[in-house]
Image (cartoon, rainbow, N blue to C red):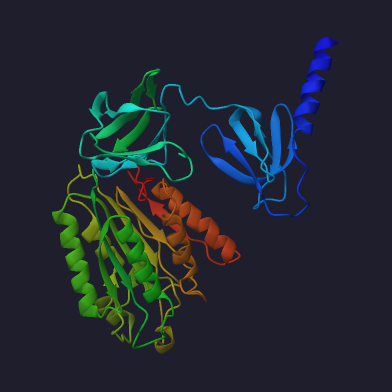
């Protein structure tokens, strides 16, 4: 009974010590200071012996924080409740701020926070410590959230290939403080090359609204992902053939991680083969088209590696299954609707904006539905190649009410991640 009475007394004291609540709907004006040295400006609603309930400006529902995580609360009227006072005389407290888990460069600058008095601050990389006196090691008073009252430490370190371990250390009279050990994987940036073509302004047949926009957006995205991009907009027959030859030569003459071909524009199939149309041709028969247009199989042959030990991954993306722009001028046509299926050689992924035998939408917006979703998927760090195109397929099917169903033909032999998390 005595223990029960003591508990009830503490609970009531904790609850009553909280100042009067702010009026419903008022802006947050109370401040919670956390043991992590972060702070939250909120509206305190309830204080209990083990938890605080509050409402933030971005949420109308109540949120909870354990008392164990809180150092103190300063209320609107200036009064305060102290729960877990920090010990400024203790050994250094060290924590990492935002840092990469993966790098494609050997030199990386990190961010850490040292709390309490500290000296002999040093960074340890793979078991070897470098003292604060190194020129690449910066120490400054921290201003950003998460290191209030501490010292911001931003060492630049050199990584070995593969997995690296990093931690910060600092001393004072109370002892040595250690940060959590951080792991960073360093993989040398491998070369990537792409040929991106967007054909909109056809001289014979209907003009397409979006391929130019699609190609320019894909070029920008791939450049940001480390690709050297050859871009052609409204390519004539001569320009397209020259670009394909340049691309093929670059693919075969370099040690590449990825070779990628992207095409947006008119495409057709004839007798089971796919042809991509330059903007300046005007074939009157299928025979003429097979001579004047560019065969997708020929481009695939340019990308294929004669070296069986090659580690290169090839990607062909065809957002090209628009309606046949020339069929009205032909008296007979053995060409099927949309594009034909293609077999992928080993190490290759071929993607179609819609399944064989169907046509794709050019789109009412700035980009086609397929390329629009591809751009979004390429923004997501850590997605494997297969996951990127699976995500695109699901989203395009949803957006088009299943009128357009993208598909892939894959014979990939290794895992590829185009956008690594940094």
Q: Nearer the viewer, residue 169 or 106?
A: 169
291 vs 394: above or below? below
Give the residue furthest to the right. 1
Q: From the top left corner, tell me how far across and down residue 214 is, in percent.
A: 40, 70
Looking at the image, which is closer to me, 372 or 106?
106
Marker count (numbered): 0
Q: Position of residue 253 (x, y in %)?
A: 13, 55
In screen coordinates, is 308 left or right of 357?
Answer: left
Q: Residue at x 27, y 26 (%)?
A: 126
Residue ranking furthest to the top: 2
Task: Identify which residue, 316 or 91, lies in the foreground.
Answer: 91
Residue 2 drawn above or below residue 58: above
Residue 354 in view: no
Quick check: can you spot residue 360? yes
Q: Is residue 3 above or below residue 180?
A: above
Q: Is residue 128 left or right of residue 57?
A: left
Q: Position of residue 187 (x, y in %)?
A: 27, 40
Residue drawn at the location 17% of the way across and 47% of the way down: 307
Q: Quadrant of the C terminus?
A: top left
Image quadrant where one finds the N terminus: top right
Q: Where is 182 relative to 204, above or below?
A: above
Q: Quick check: 242 left or right of 380?
A: left
Residue occupying the far front of the picture: 78
Image coordinates of residue 331 in percent, x first then y, are: 41, 87
Q: Is residue 152 left or right of residue 49?
A: left
């Amino acid at each position: 009974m005595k223990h029960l009475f003591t508990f009830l007394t503490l609970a009531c004291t904790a609850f009553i010590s909280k100042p009067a609540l702010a009026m419903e709907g008022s802006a947050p004006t109370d401040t919670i200071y956390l043991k992590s040295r972060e702070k939250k400006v909120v509206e305190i609603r309830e204080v209990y012996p083990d938890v605080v309930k509050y409402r933030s400006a971005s949420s109308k529902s109540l949120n909870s924080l354990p008392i164990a995580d809180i150092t103190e609360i300063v209320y609107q009227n200036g009064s305060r409740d102290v729960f877990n006072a920090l010990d400024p005389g203790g050994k250094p407290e060290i924590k990492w701020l935002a840092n990469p888990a993966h790098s494609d460069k050997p030199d990386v600058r990190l961010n850490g926070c040292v709390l309490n008095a500290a000296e002999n601050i040093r960074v340890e990389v793979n078991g070897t410590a470098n003292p604060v006196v190194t020129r690449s090691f910066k120490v400054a008073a921290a201003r950003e959230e998460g290191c209030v009252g501490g010292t911001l430490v931003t060492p630049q370190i050199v990584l070995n290939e593969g997995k690296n371990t990093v931690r910060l250390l600092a001393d004072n009279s109370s002892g040595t403080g250690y940060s959590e050990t951080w792991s960073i994987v360093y993989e040398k940036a491998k070369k990537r090359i792409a040929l991106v073509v967007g054909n909109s302004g056809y001289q014979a047949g209907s003009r397409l609204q979006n391929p130019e926009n699609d190609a320019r957006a894909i070029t920008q995205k791939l450049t940001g992902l480390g690709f050297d991009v050859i871009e052609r907009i409204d390519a004539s027959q001569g320009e397209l053939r020259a670009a394909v030859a340049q691309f093929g030569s670059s693919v075969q003459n370099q040690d590449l991680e990825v070779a990628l071909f992207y095409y947006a524009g008119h495409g057709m199939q004839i007798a089971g083969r796919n042809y991509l149309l330059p903007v300046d041709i005007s074939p009157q028969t299928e025979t003429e088209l097979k001579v004047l247009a560019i065969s997708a199989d020929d481009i695939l042959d340019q990308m294929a590696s004669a070296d069986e030990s090659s580690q290169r991954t090839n990607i062909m993306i065809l957002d090209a299954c628009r309606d046949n722009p020339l069929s009205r001028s032909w008296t007979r046509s053995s060409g099927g609707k949309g594009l034909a299926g293609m077999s992928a050689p080993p190490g290759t992924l071929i993607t179609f904006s819609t399944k064989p035998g169907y046509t794709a939408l050019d789109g009412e917006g700035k980009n086609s539905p397929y390329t629009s979703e591809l751009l979004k998927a390429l923004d997501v760090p850590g997605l494997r190649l297969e996951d990127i195109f699976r995500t695109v397929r699901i989203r395009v099917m949803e957006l088009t009410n299943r009128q357009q169903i993208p598909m892939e033909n894959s014979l990939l032999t290794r895992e590829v991640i185009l956008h690594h998390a940094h």
